[in-house]
């Protein structure tokens, strides 16, 4: 009976496989796994990151090169440590006024004797006192009886210190304007954006900063700005070195082969 059924099924569908009872069908061979072809999309993020790193390194190197003159700062020259204070200047002015008053009084006594208003011996004494007082004002004689500087000495010292500070500021500013160049590093030190430095920035941009420094307060303000710029320079330099090391670690030869900034 079973043989008849199989014979009938074979005659109806001759292409159907003949299955014998008790034997499982042969398994179909499994197809090999298809590997996805690499696409260029996976390289795009790495290429964009490399481009950004190269652009930032170029920007940092340019900022460091433009502001490297901040390393030439002479703190002692701009700090004006020997600047005569107002009290010393006032005391010297009082001594100067007393000296002038004494000389004028002695001269009046001498002239009064010549006109006959006072006796001759008083007029002679007035003339002697006038000569002595004048000699006491001579710098060479004055150093013999006191070590305190005169009012004129203090004024000359102030002018000399201010002149040296202006000369140093002119050397730092150069032809491009150091303050204006360092303002680009404000991202590393927000203090460079303070409003009190706005006038310095404007003068430096016009290359006329050194000639407009006429007071001690201007020199101190310039010194404060350069100290803040020096902090920003150190941070920018550290960021550049970190980016350079990252380029070496990532194998970005185009970024790592860029020249380092001058120090």
Image: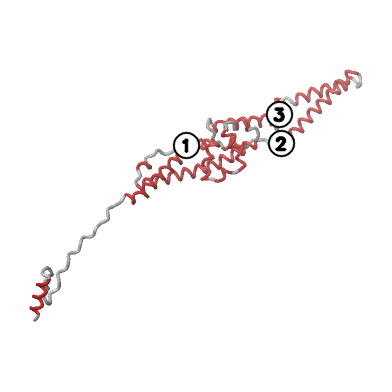
Residue 81 figure quarter: top right
Are there few (<14), some (14-19), or many (20+) residues within 10 Å of tag 3?
Answer: some
Q: Nearer the viewer, residue 196 or 86?
A: 196
Q: Name the side, left or right, on which 88 lies relative to 170.
A: right
Residue 65 got which mark? 1
Q: Position of residue 211 (x, y in %)?
A: 61, 30
Circle 3 sits in a helix, a strand or a loop, which is it? helix
Give the mark nearer the N terminus: 1 vs 2. Answer: 1
* Front-lying residue, 210 or 34: 34
What label does residue 88 carry, if any?
Answer: 2
User: In the drawing, what numbered circle is on residue 152?
Assistant: 3
Could you tell which of marks 1 and 3 lies nearer the N-terminus? 1
Where residue 87 sits: x, y (%)?
72, 38
| In the depicted structure, whether residue 61 falls above or below residue 21 | above
Q: Name the residue nearer the viewer: 104 or 70.
A: 70
Residue sitting farthest toward the bottom: 1
């Amino acid at each position: 009976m079973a043989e008849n059924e199989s014979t009938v099924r074979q005659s109806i569908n001759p292409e159907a496989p003949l299955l014998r009872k008790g034997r499982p069908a042969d398994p179909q061979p499994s197809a090999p796994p298809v590997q996805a072809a690499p696409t260029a999309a996976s390289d795009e993020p790495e290429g964009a990151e490399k481009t950004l790193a190269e652009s930032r390194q170029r920007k940092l190197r340019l900022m460091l090169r433009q502001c490297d003159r901040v390393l030439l700062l002479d703190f002692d020259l701009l700090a004006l440590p020997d600047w005569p204070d107002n009290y010393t200047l006032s005391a010297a002015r009082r001594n100067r006024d007393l000296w002038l008053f004494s000389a004028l009084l002695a001269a009046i006594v001498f002239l009064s004797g010549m006109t006959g208003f006072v006796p001759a011996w008083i007029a002679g004494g007035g003339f002697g006192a006038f000569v002595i007082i004048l000699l006491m004002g001579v710098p060479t004689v004055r150093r013999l009886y006191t070590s305190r500087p005169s009012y004129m000495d203090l004024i000359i010292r102030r002018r000399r210190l201010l002149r040296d500070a202006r000369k140093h500021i002119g050397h730092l500013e150069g032809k491009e304007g150091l303050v204006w160049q360092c303002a680009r590093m404000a991202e590393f030190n927000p203090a460079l954006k303070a409003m009190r430095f706005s006038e310095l920035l404007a003068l430096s941009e016009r290359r006329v900063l050194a000639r407009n420094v006429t007071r001690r307060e201007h020199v101190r303000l310039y010194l404060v700005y350069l100290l803040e710029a020096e902090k920003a320079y150190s941070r920018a330099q550290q960021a550049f070195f970190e980016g350079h090391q990252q380029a070496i670690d990532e194998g970005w030869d185009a970024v790592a082969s860029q020249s380092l900034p001058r120090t």
